[in-house]
Amino acid sequence: MSDELVELAKRRGFFFQAAEPYGGVSGFYVYGPQGAALKRNIEDSWRDRFQVQEGHREIEAPTIMPEPVFEASGHLDTFDDMLVECPECGESHRADHLIEDNTDIEDAESFPLDEVGDLIADHDLHCPNCDTSLAGEPVEDFNLMFETDIGPGSGQPGYLRPETAQGIFVEFPRLKEYARNQLPFGTTQIGKAYRNEISPRKSIVRVREFTQAELEHFIDPEEDEPPLERVEDVEVRLYSAPKQNADDGDYLDTTIGEAVEEGIIASDWVAYYVGVAQEWYERIGIDMNRFRFRQHLAGERSHYASDCWDAEGEIGGDWIELAGISDRSDYDLSKHGEYSDDDFTVFRQYDEPKVVERATVDPDMSYLGPEFGGAAGDITDALQRLAERNRSAFDSDEVTVEANGESYTIPVEKTGFSVDEVKESGEHITPHVIEPSIGVGRALYTVLVHSYEEDDVEGETRTRLSLEPELAPTTVGVFPLMDKDGMGETAREIATDLRTSGFDVTYDDSGNIGRRYRRQDEVGTPFCVTVDYEGLEDDTVTLRERDSTKQIRVAVADLADILTDLRSG
Ligand code: ATP
C-alpha cells in the first residue's frame, strides 16, 4: 500500500492501529468511521451474493469454543507456523517467510523443521530487526490459536476460533434438522477469527484478529450438482505457479465453462464458486487486471482440503491471498462425528427400496463373561462397527477389536456374526463441504488500493477513491453554497429527507465548495448535492458525479429516485 494511502486511511478514519495511547499492539486494527461503514457495505454485498442469491441462511456462533472441538478439527495438532527467535533482540520471525523473502526457495513451508534450520544456516540469514545471524537457532512449530480458560478455575481450556467455519460444522446436527435433513444446503457466517500470527505485517493484510465471511455448502457428492449454467460464461484468469507471491507462472484467460470442460478446475462445485467469487470481486470494484485465481499444490493445502483455489489480488507488485475456495470433502463432519456423540450424517433415500446384504453381530454378548471387565457392551458396539466396515475380519477363527482403549481378541463363533439380506429404503452418508472463505479486511484493503487515484481537476491534483456507489461509506454529500439566505436550512432539510429515505448522507458547510468536493472525493463519496441561489428560486439542486465531476440540475422532488437509480448502477 502506498504511503499516501496509509496516511489517508488513518487521517480520514478508514483504519488505524488499535490501542495507540498505550503504544499499540501489533496485529490489531480499528476500523474508523469511514472504514467501519465501508466494511459493513462489503459484508452486505457479500451476504447478497453468496447467501441471499444462493438461497442460504446465516448463523452466528460463539468465537470461543472448548478444546475438544479443535482436537477433532485437527487445529490443535496441525495449525502451526514455523518460528525462529532472534537470540539478540528476542524478535520472533516466521522461518518460512524469512527464507522465501531472502532466497529463491518458494515453498519453504513444505520442508521439515530441521531442514528449515539448515536452510537458514546455509543461506546465512539474519534477523530483519537487528541483523544478528540466525544460523544454528532452533526452528519450532508454533500453534496459532489463542488459548483461554473457560470459567474461573474450571480448568476447561478453550480457544478463540481460528476460522468461523468450525462454529458451523459443530452445529451440523441441528442445522440439518432445520434443513429438514435435505441436501444440499448452505450455512453462512460473517464474524471474527483469531490467529496469533508470528509476524503480523502489511497493515491489515496479516493481523491477529480479522473478519471472515464463510459459506459452508453441504452437498451429497454423488447426487448434487451445482447450477454451473449460471456462471459458465464468467471469464476468469487462472494462474499456475507454486507460490502465492510469484509472477512468473502461466496465465490462462478462460471461462468457467471451459475450465470445467478441460478439467482445469476438477471439481464442478469449486468451479461454480470460483465463478461466483469472480463476479463478486468485480462487483466490489477490484481491478480485474490485478486479480487471479491460483490452484493450491498438494503440499500447500490445508489439512482438510482436497482441492483449493485462492483468489489473489495484486498490491504494489505483491500478490496477496484474498480468499480460499476449497473442497473440504467430508473431513470436518467425519471428524466431529468421530470425536463427539452426535450424528453428523444425513439419510440418503433410495429411489426404490433396495435389497442389500447386512452384516451383524449378536447384540447381546453378556455371555463374554467377567474376564472382559464389564466392557461387553462396548466390545459389541466395536464388533458391529467392524462388521459393517470390514466383513473379511470375521473370516478367520478369531477377531480383534479396540474398545475402551484396550484390545480384545474374541473367537468369531462367539460373536454371532452373520450376513443377511435386508430391504433398505436408504443409507446414512456424511455430506461433503464446499467452502468459499473470504477475508473481509483483505477485500477492503484491496478495494482501497485499486480505487485510489490521483487526477487533475481545475489545475489541482485531487485524490479520489473511485469506490462503487454500493460500497461508499457516504452515498451523498449535501452542501449549501453558503450557509446564508436560507440555503443552509434547505440543504439541512434535504439531508434529513435523504437520510429518511435510507441514504448515508454527510452534510458539510465549511470551507469553499471546491474544498468540500475534494473532501468527499477523498473518501469515495460518489454524489454531491449543492443548494445554490438558483435552486432556492425553483426547488432544484446541482448533482455532481465524483469521477467525471459532471454536474446536472435536478428537481429536489426527484432527487431520492435519481440517487436510488444511480446507486444501483
Ligand atoms: P495466509 O496463507 O495468507 O496466512 P491462509 O491460507 O492461512 O492465509 P485461510 O485459512 O484460507 O488463510 O483463510 C481464509 C481467508 O481469511 C484468507 O484468504 C484471508 O483473506 C483471510 N485471512 C487469513 N489469515 C488472515 C490474517 N492473519 N489476517 C487477515 N486476514 C486473514
Image (cartoon, rainbow, N blue to C red):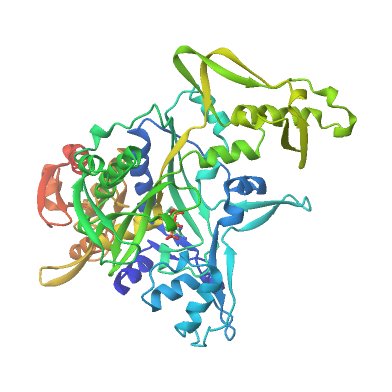
Instruction: Say which of 16 and 518 sits in front.
Output: 16
**Going 56% across and 18% down the picture, which residue do you hit?**
357
In the shown orientation, is residue 316 left or right of residue 193? left
Q: Is residue 389 visible?
A: yes
Instruction: Say which of 27 and 234 sits in front.
Output: 234
In the shown orientation, is residue 432 left or right of residue 245? right
In the shown orientation, is residue 219 left or right of residue 359? left
- The image quadrant where one finds ligand 1 is bottom left
Position of the C terminus by quadrant: top left
Q: Is residue 372 above or below residue 283?
A: above
x and y, in percent, of residue 135 in the image: 53, 84
In the shown orientation, is residue 45 left or right of residue 87? left
x and y, in percent, of residue 422 in the image: 57, 12
Position of the N terminus by quadrant: bottom left
**Going 29% across and 72% down the picture, which residue do you hit?**
4
**Going 13% across and 57% down the picture, which residue do you hit?**
549
